[in-house]
Image: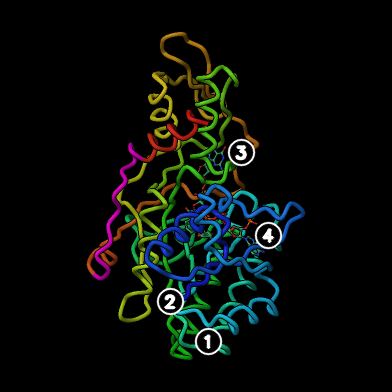
Amino acid sequence: MKKALITGISGQDGYYLSQLLLEKGYEVHGLVRRNSQLSIGNLSKLDEKIQKKIIIHWGDITDHCIVEKIIKDIKPKEMYHLAAQSFVGLSFENPRHTYNVNIDGTLNVANAVREFSPKTRVYFAATSEMFGKVQETPQNEKTPFYPRSPYGVSKLAGFWTMKNYRESYGLFMSNGILFNHESEVRGPEFVTRKICMAVANISKKKQEYLELGNMDSRRDWGHAADYVYGMWLMLQYKKPDDFVLATGENHSVRDFVERAFKEVGIDIGWEGKELNEKGFDKKTKKVLVKVNPEFFRPADVEVLKGNYSKAKKQLGWKPRITFNKLVKVMMQNELNQ
Ligand code: NAP
Ligand code: F7E
């Protein structure tokens, strides 16, 4: 049986990727860091029968001893390195922790594979945040990088570590430069899930209004289920390489808010500018969206839009879930809670 190891298996992408690999007949191993509740994060949302099939190894990605031991013991055919401090906003407050997990953790993976399992094919979760202050639009694999946060900087170090190990030691290490992908199990602090949770609560009269930061920010949002399939395709490809996965479209945070409210039958109008901007229900005139400076970042990535033609041509990958469908499934999930 083919063995796969997923770090960060308890996160959003781990939830979808573990199911995909089990469906494909892999023996799935996952690294989970211990917490006082012994919680397995999103994996606990899986059907119990599926959960039981996943072999959990407890450990932190920054601990090279455990990373080496697991890779040496399992010698996986494929390894998906997803573990990261992935919240951009927090990376400004906790830059050291972000570097430790995202840079040292990735170096631990690269070294352990090099030393104990050089035939393992490795996927690294790189990101569109590396493009940051974008140097061209749309962004592709050749676009120069300009990260705008400690998170972006840390992922760029991981990206180059993979590329350098690939070129220096002939290892199969591929970088997925993935644009934002969301889902029903997205962490609640990310803007899409935060909006959907608030809109569902407002429609059920459990919350008065939603507070946001930079609503002009534009993102290329897809669904995580499509993107984990792209990760798998990268490791089936004849050689290691770097690939952008995106939808090729972008929308502002404001567009996302409007779309989410439409799902509960509310038409949002806007008035005021910058910190005084407000979103109101066109019918009742009630203010439902406000700006709170607390949610602005010291530097933001204003606009992202990816060009996925390399992945389309070489991997046969394309996104299936549209922006409107993404908002719909996320909203339906919140309304059913
Ligand atoms: P996520 O939901 O935040 O999941 C991150 C995972 O990493 C969680 O399982 C988390 O464990 C684990 N982790 C964090 N610190 C760790 C540590 N010190 N040791 C071991 N595990 C640790 O992120 P995601 O959305 O699934 O994204 C997966 C990967 O893709 C991340 O590397 C992210 O940076 C990258 N990425 C995401 C996107 C996106 O739009 N989603 C786009 C591009 C790249 P806990 O459950 O214990 O917190
Ligand atoms: O912010 C703006 C915010 O936190 C999106 C991670 O998966 O994708 C994700 O990073 C935009 C930003 O995601 C709020 O300023 C406004 O411009 O949902 P986000 P992100 O920063 O794009 C990339 C590709 C990754 O790799 C990351 O791991 O929305 N925004 N108001 C807000 N953002 C949040 N979180 N909360 C607000 O209230």
Does the CB distance between marks 2 and 4 fall below 8 Å? no
Q: Which segment did they paint magenta?
A: 314-325
Does the CB distance between marks 3 and 1 fall below 8 Å? no
Q: How many marks?
A: 4
* Residue tagged 1: 117
* Spatial CA span between label 3 and label 1: 43 Å
Circle number at residue 2: 2
Does the CB distance between marks 4 and 1 fall below 8 Å? no
Q: Which of the two marks, 2 or 3, is nearer to us in this view?
A: 2
Among numbered discs 2 and 3, the one appearing first in the sequence:
2
* Spatial CA span between label 4 and label 1: 31 Å
* Residue tagged 4: 95
In reply to whether residue 87 is colored magenta, the answer given is no
- In the rendered view, does 102 fall on the left or right side of 331? right
Instruction: Look at label 3 and name its amino acid.
Output: Phe
Q: In what element is the residue under mark 3?
A: helix
Among numbered discs 1 and 2, the one appearing first in the sequence:
2
Nearest to the observer: residue 39 or residue 121: 39
Near mark 1 (Cα within 10 A), the count class, few <14, some 14-19 or many ≥20, is some
Q: Where does residue 232 sit, x and y in percent of width and height? A: 38, 67
Instruction: Look at label 1 and name its amino acid.
Output: Ser
Q: Is residue 151 visible?
A: yes
- In the rendered view, does 33 fall on the left or right side of 282? right
Near mark 2 (Cα within 10 A), the count class, few <14, some 14-19 or many ≥20, is few
Is 109 above or below relative to 249? below
Near mark 4 (Cα within 10 A), the count class, few <14, some 14-19 or many ≥20, is some
Q: Label 3 CB, ligand 2: below 8 Å?
A: yes
Q: In what element is the residue under mark 2?
A: loop
* Spatial CA span between label 2 and label 3: 44 Å
Nearest to the observer: residue 326 or residue 299: 326
Q: Which of the two marks, 1 or 2, is nearer to us in this view?
A: 2
